[in-house]
Image (tube, rainbow, N blue to C red):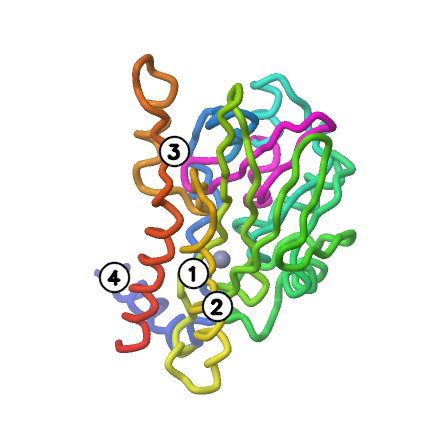
Amino acid sequence: MRKTVALAISVAGMTAMGAASQPAAPDPIKWMAPQSPARLYGSTYLVGFGDLNVAMIRTSAGLILVDGGVPQGVAQIKAHLRQIGFSIRDVKLILSTEPHSDHAGGFAALALDSGATVIASAAGAAVLRTGGGDPDDPQAAWLDRFPAVPKLRVARHGETIRLGDTIVTAHATPGHTLGSMSWSWKSCEGKACRTIVFGASLNPVAADGWRFADPAHASFVDAFRASFERVKAMPCDMLIPSHPAADQADRLTRLGKARTANPFLDPGACRAYAQRAEAALANKLTE
Ligand SMILES: [Zn+2]
């Protein structure tokens, strides 16, 4: 009985102090649901986790990683690379979708171990350099800091980045953060080449008290709306969302089974992804 009272008091105390110190994201380890590395199509692989995607592109001049997971996930990403016959030292470029700890937390260590260059949008790079702490972020009140990324290259919307035989295009998709960037490239199996899109989060999420409907935050709503249209119109044969779809594990199980179509190829995936986010933003604006 005494215990219950004490607990009630401590919870009330935390509430009184404000939710600001409470992280929104679950414990970082919870993002790291085990997932074996897998080749999705041609030169495109997944080397991340069940709850957080990290993509790897094999080129004729080394590897490209897209996103870097949480700081605690670096050793596992390196182990996944080894498991499929590569080394962290093969990584030449690391592309960033957004400057939040779940996607960018591993960058500093991954870049140090590989010597790779981290590439982000200008707004994303500004936050990566300080390891988070952007006061204008809708989730600023509850975001975790992460190891700062000292060395960065900035990419503009539409810019192409070449490594060996592979060209990756940067697509600014702001909203979730103002620096959010999605990335696309082609992977081929024989003569069949497909456009792969690694989609930044389009989730309209904000800390308690921060409202998208607030006129002061109109720039985020405008950014989102432009991003939705951009993602719907993107050439896209396969979408790898930065946060995996709920059925990713199921699709990985089906992948590579004889006489089964590649369950990751879906030319409607980008459009559906944008439409779901659009509906979520509409909800936020009316709630
Ligand atoms: Zn985020």
Q: Which mark is residue 24?
A: 1
Q: Which residues are magenta?
A: 49-76
The verdict on residue 190 being magenta is no
The earlier-in-sequence mark between 1 and 2 is 1
- Judge left or right: residue 22 versus residue 159: left
**For numbered disc 2, what is the local secondary structure?**
loop
Distance between mark 1 and mark 2 Cα atoms: 8 Å
User: Mark 2: is the Cβ under 8 angstroms from ligand 1?
Assistant: yes
- Residue under label 2, please give it: 139
**For numbered disc 3, what is the local secondary structure?**
loop
The earlier-in-sequence mark between 4 and 3 is 4
- Residue under label 4, please give it: 4
Find residue 116 and report its horizontal and vertical position in percent.
Answer: 75, 39
Whether the residues at callouts 1 and 2 have beta carbons within 8 Å, the answer is yes
Q: Residue at x 38, y 33 (%)?
A: 264
Regarding residue 9, the answer to whether it shows in the image is yes
Crowding at label 2, few (<14), some or many (≥20) Cα neighbours within 10 Å? many
Residue kind at label 2, given as amino acid type:
Gln
**For numbered disc 4, what is the local secondary structure?**
helix
Q: Which mark is residue 265?
A: 3
Distance between mark 4 and mark 3 Cα atoms: 52 Å
Vertical comparison of 87 with 130: above or below: above
The earlier-in-sequence mark between 2 and 4 is 4
Observer-side mark, 1 or 3, equals 3
Total count of labels: 4
